[in-house]
Amino acid sequence: METVEGRNQSLIMEFILLGFGDAMELQPLLFLLFLLVYIGTLAGNTLITVLVVADPHLHTPMYFFVGNLACLETLYSSTILPRFLASLLSGDRTISVKNCLVQTYFFSIIASTENLLLAAMSYDRYLAICNPLRYTALMNGRVCCQLVAGSWLYSFLVVGVLNSFLFPLTFCESKEIDHYFCDFSPMIKLSCYDPQLLKLATLIICAIGTVVPLLLTLASYVCIISTILRIPSSIGRKKAFSTCSSHLMVVTIIYISLIIVYVFPSSNTSTVLNKVFSLFYTVLNPMINPIIYSLRNKEVKESLRKAIVKVVTFRNRP
């Protein structure tokens, strides 16, 4: 990669994350808002994980994936929000280049793993609805573990390739990153080198990591919906659709946000709009996932009711 002529060659050792602007009077409100979101995210996803592990009735492939997704969402929020909350509280928005690269690395691994995990969940629903007689044979504990482990392994490999382009870079254009966390695209713009090759590599890898799982998910749901429509009774159709409606809702929110931020050319989307849509998959989605999966699933609600009864009974024991 060649250095771009005319750029300021004074090497940068730290960045300034601009976040959501310089309005100091809004910082306490933003801190309180994101703190509540973070606490709610940790509490909700931890509760889902504990219920899935503790209740034998939830020891099924679907809830195995839900429990793994809850753990993933906890990691997702913890990669971004603690640093952002600290900057809102202290007013110090600087972050070293090294720490910024590390945050980008772990964020990218978790985001890629989530996409693949959602695709695995759609495959699970496809087997349950379209091939129910062979479901227990095709989707057993070994297959579930392989799908989760494969998602993590693939993400480590793909993100490792992308970071092999990013980690050797030096930065000399500006200290300011117009975002609330370290992401590939804003960092590449500050590189001392011609960013076109890096932008192309980022676009290709992000498209593969986003579009391929999306196509697999869409193919699964085309088969699922066509099978549901062939069910003769309306009660049967409603019951079948209810088993995948929560997952479909989560997939829709995540992929609309990811495609707008990473797949569409950045010149067509404003920086403010990019940050708003980034909030959906980095902050809001991890918080609402437990709500979607718990409020729309009778098994989870029943497991939660039993857990509350046990806690109350234990506390009232003489």
Image: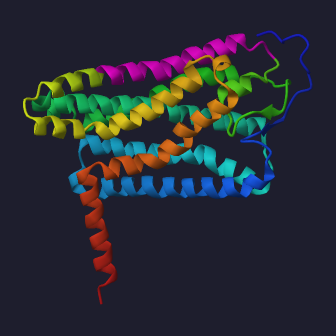
- Residue 65, position as x, y percentages in the image: 33, 41
Query: Where does the magenta region start and end?
Result: 193-219
**87 is within the stretch colored magenta:** no
Question: Quarter holding the C terminus?
Answer: bottom left
- Residue 296, position as x, y percentages in the image: 30, 48
- Residue 274, position as x, y percentages in the image: 63, 30
- Residue 142, position as x, y percentages in the image: 26, 36
Q: Main secondary structure of the magenta part?
A: helix
Determine which quarter of the picture holds residue 313.
Answer: bottom left
**212 is within the stretch colored magenta:** yes
* Residue 93 higher or lower than 266, as above or below: below
Q: Residue at x 71, y 11 (%)?
A: 196
Q: Residue at x 68, y 35 (%)?
A: 182
**For residue 222, side relative to residue 262 (left or right):** left
**For residue 291, side relative to residue 59 (left or right):** right
Q: Residue at x 64, y 23 (%)?
A: 269
* Residue 232 higher or lower than 36, as above or below: above
